[in-house]
Image: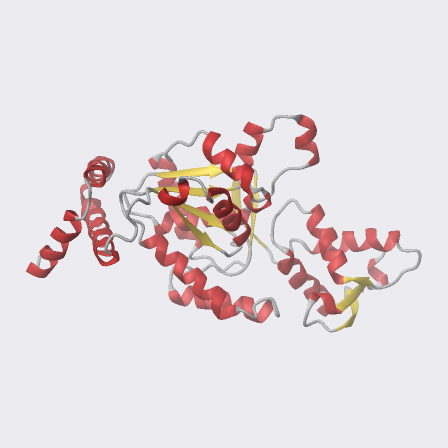
Amino acid sequence: MKMEDLNWLKQAISKLDEQEAKALLHVLLVRSEQHEENELSEILQSVKESLHRLSKNDGKIEGLETVHIVFGDSTGGSLKASFRETSYELTEEIIVLSDNFSVGPIESLHTKKGLESRFQWFKENYHPFFDDFEQYKAGMVKAVEKIKAITPDQQVVIWTGENAAEQTGLRIVLYLLDKKPNKVLELNTFKAFHENFMYSQLEEEWLPRTSGELTPERLLLFYEQFELRPMRLAKRHALCDEGKNLLRMESLLRTWEHGELWHSNVDRDDDIIIRCAKYLHKEQSTYNFMKSARLIGEVIGHMQQYTGDEWIEFRLRALISKEVFVYRGDLQAMRLYEVKLNEEFLR
């Protein structure tokens, strides 16, 4: 090791307080017992890189004991609101991955090229949703870099739910955290909801499909009352491997079913779009055009899978191009056009 490398390493270590130093030593010892000898050098390298970042940050992250990783702006905003004016503001950091990982390409998403490819696909297919394309992309790049910069002494809480978006995100994040010695905990809001609200009537009327559907008050309740246990090493490795495989796939759509993540054909949701259109046509006094937003809302309300309305609108335009639907108006924005089923599909 070069002399200058030794100097910055000593400086970084000197900035650790007693608690941080003990935590770092503890995780190093634990991880050395859990890994093969040839993996230990990679773990040590990860620790060195984290110390280097800590040295460059010059103490800016001091006091942040826990890092929360959430998927979607709604969840991120609610969790930040729930921590406001609490002691968690001083000890917790929230990293928001704004994207919906159930849809769109995720191949090589952990690289700059992969991120560029993903957002270029959205820009071409989700118009005009990505008018703020560059700002959105920059936010994702920053979030990924923050995850890579998590220091070894911080515990990581990953918020998930029973849906493909958050379950895909969980696996990708665990891949990004591979070789890091941090304690990782998963807070599944769907399971937490069931544990805290066992009234059958409430369960029948409403279930959270994503963490973003929950109020700040409920998120705070779950964090404080839901029993969080460190993820078992075997499970972490298995999900990390799944994340690695996901980042090699070229699929555009993912399904969460029976506790497993599946790749699906892009036309998976086309049948429910057609069924909902038939239902809305039956409600009309005469066979006529309907607002595209009305149809998309009806589809979202009946879907078990979570995709977001942009994906359904993307598939609706695909069905228009196949002449399953006819339209009038301007396809450049959901609010600007109306649709109706081609008469031969009404039967």
Pick out the residue farthest to the right: 285
Residue, far left:
3
For residue 306, above or below residue 327: above
| Quarter holding residue 8 | bottom left
Residue 276 in the image: state x and y as whole percent: 77, 52
Q: Is there any visible trace of residue 347 in the rendered image?
A: no
Instruction: From the viewer's perspective, tell me whether residue 239 is left or right of residue 255.
Output: left
Q: Is residue 75 left or right of residue 247?
A: right
Q: Residue at x 72, y 52 (%)?
A: 299
Quadrant placement of the N terminus:
bottom left
Question: What residue is shown at x 65% (from left), y 26% (from top)?
Answer: 199
Q: Residue furthest top?
A: 199
Residue 39: image location, x then y, percent: 22, 45
Nearest to the observer: residue 270 or residue 300: 300
Which of the colour schemes (rainbow, by chain, secondary structure, one colour) is used? secondary structure
Image coords of residue 60 (percent x, y): 29, 53
In x, y percent, where is residue 76?
Answer: 50, 50
Please name the residue shown 36% across and 42% down the image.
91
Work out which residue is located at the far front of the displayed protein and give it.
85
- Residue 70, compared with residue 226, is above or below; it is below
Give the number of marks: 0
Report the side of 297 relative to 188 (left or right): right
Q: Quadrant of the C terminus?
A: bottom right
* Left or right placement of residue 255 versus residue 232 in this view: right
User: Is any part of residue 178 visible from this angle?
Assistant: yes
State the residue at coordinates (46%, 35%): 223
